[in-house]
Amino acid sequence: MATLVTFHAHPDDECIACGGVMRKAAEEGHRVVLVVATRGEHGEVDDGFLDDGEELWQRRVVETQAAADILGVQRVEFLGYVDSGMIGTPTNDLPGSFWTADVEEAAEKLAAILREENADVLTIYDDNGGYGHPDHIQVHRVGTRAAELAGTPRVYQNTMNRDHMERGMKALADQAAESGMEMPDMDGDQEFGKPESVLTAAVDVTDYIEYKRRAMRAHASQISEQSFFLAMPDEGFRYAFGTEWFIREGQGPGITETDLLAGL
């Protein structure tokens, strides 16, 4: 049995990015640990969704545990930083935000968990955080340093396959227009994911796709039934989320791994 630690920026990131890998590892008998940098304080929520006196972060903590249970996670930890919000917003620079955190200090917090768990594998994000969100970029920086401090042998940078995504978005656009489904905003200056040529690991998680979708549904404050994630047809969902993509330094060129815990 090995231990997989998967490190994310906000509640709901875990199931979108690594939900399949997490459930796969759990079903194969490995220990799965989820670490979240923030409690997602600056997410958006519809009026009337929260109970009287309830803060959004409180609901998101509950949602995270519910999703973690679906994905087979055995331990959930929050590092205690505050959601920094989207890039270029005033919340980026507020005291306590993850974006302003000292990387060495935050890395030591994560490294302590890695040491305690004797982690074999750590997942983080790519150097652009997948799409340029400051907290996601910080996950890359903090996670990379934490693995160095703890001596964690395998570090995988979760990312999106940009070429695969572009192919799928073109096909999905016509379906969305017919059904009235809301499409995510892909315009602007953000770069999503990495080109196929730099990816080194592709994990087929289609056997666990319904767990992944159920975990997304558990984050109801952020992922509504009308959202892109839940409203898309099953075939489109399998295409978009049935493979989870990673980069591991020293691997490649091309896809050389299909299981993050192979041989452990």
Image (cartoon, grey):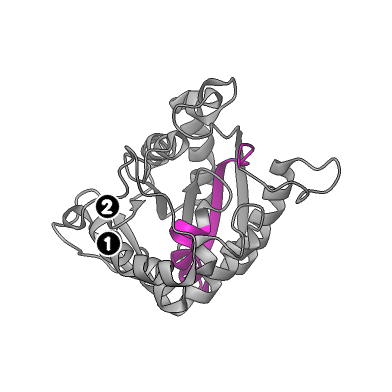
Image coords of residue 94 (percent x, y): 57, 21
| Residue at 57% in and 35% down | 83
Residue sticking out furthest to the left: 253
Which is more N-terminal, label 2 or label 1? 1
| Residue at 23% in and 59% down | 163
From this view, report whether residue 101 is shown above or below residue 67.
Answer: above
Describe the element under mark 2 as helix, strand or loop: loop
From this view, report whether residue 103 is shown above or below residue 192.
Answer: above
Image coords of residue 17 (percent x, y): 44, 57
Q: Which mark is residue 248?
A: 2
Q: Specify whether residue 176 is in view.
A: yes
Per the image, is 30 magenta? yes
| Residue at 30% in and 43% down | 191
| Residue at 61% in and 37% down | 42
Start-end of magenta stretch = 15-43
Image coords of residue 120 (percent x, y): 41, 55
Q: Please give left or right for residue 25 compared with residue 57 in the image.
A: left
